Image: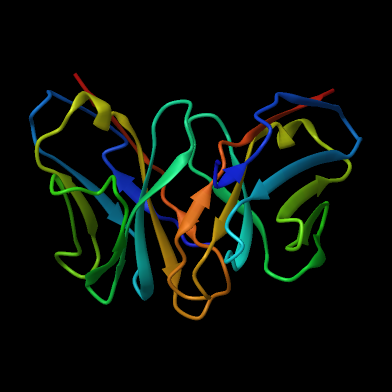
Amino acid sequence: EPEVTQTPSHQVTQMGQEVILRCVPISNHLYFYWYRQILGQKVEFLVSFYNNEISEKSEIFDDQFSVERPDGSNFTLKIRSTKLEDSAMYFCAIKSRGTSYGYTFGSGTRLTVV
Amino acid sequence: QKEVEQNSGPLSVPEGAIASLNCTYSDRGSQSFFWYRQYSGKSPELIMFIYSNGDKEDGRFTAQLNKASQYVSLLIRDSQPSDSATYLCAVNRANFGNEKLTFGTGTRLTIIP
């Protein structure tokens, strides 16, 4: 299975600040996803990204969130004005072309909003 | 009604025994079903997926699916201390391709040496 690296591994930010979380998968992936997991809670879908555009997003993914694949390699999640309740682990996930069901999660970014 | 339900545990199983993890889901349109393992502070790791009724075996792991009962289970044979983790059940409504997973809260499994 390919490794999916996320940076930073831990980010502390002040409420109201913008953060950008990065995911660096190996190339030739078809689908990209962001999930989050608030401490002690379930993993929740945020958004899926296919062919350089959003294919589906959840209710959580409001106007404060955006995703990009700026250089064809990195995949980013931006939160424009962070809130305390945005504190969570954020995971990107990738699905390779031609593989079977399921996908690979990245190593995760722990976001702490203070 | 929760979309994907799991007993949160903890479930304690002696080393070498069979661990049985269960999951029910509410959406009858669900197409594929997954079991992920998550160690504390780490990302989910795919263990198995299943999309047809019946059993699917992979090494020490067996996934079982009963769509009529909306029930998925995971059996771990010859449990090892390294199997101690939280096991996440996830379901996908979409067809193969752009999968969007709905997760349960997970069952914490502890293997007792």
Residue sitting at the far top: A114
The mark total stands at 0
Q: Nearer the viewer, residue A92 or A24?
A: A92
Whole-percent x and y of residue A41? 47, 31
Whole-percent x and y of residue B13? 84, 28
Residue B102 against residue A32 in the figure, above or below: above
Q: Quadrant of the C terminus of chain B?
A: top right
Q: Nearer the viewer, residue B11 or A2?
A: B11
For this view, does A52 lie left or right of residue B47?
left
Q: Nearer the viewer, residue B107 or A5?
A: B107
Whole-percent x and y of residue B9? 70, 26
Q: Quadrant of residue A25?
A: bottom left
For this view, does B59 lie left or right of residue A80?
right
Residue sitting at the far bottom: A98
Residue B14 against residue A66 in the figure, above or below: above
**Residue in the picture at 12% in, 23% down:** A14
Whole-percent x and y of residue B59? 82, 57
Q: Quadrant of the N terminus of chain B?
A: top right
Residue A7 against residue A50 in the figure, above or below: above
Q: Quadrant of residue A82?
A: top left
Residue sitting at the far front: B1
**Residue in the picture at 87% in, 45% down:** B77
Q: How is the image coloured?
A: rainbow
For this view, does B88 lie left or right of residue A29?
right
**Residue in the picture at 56% in, 49% down:** B45
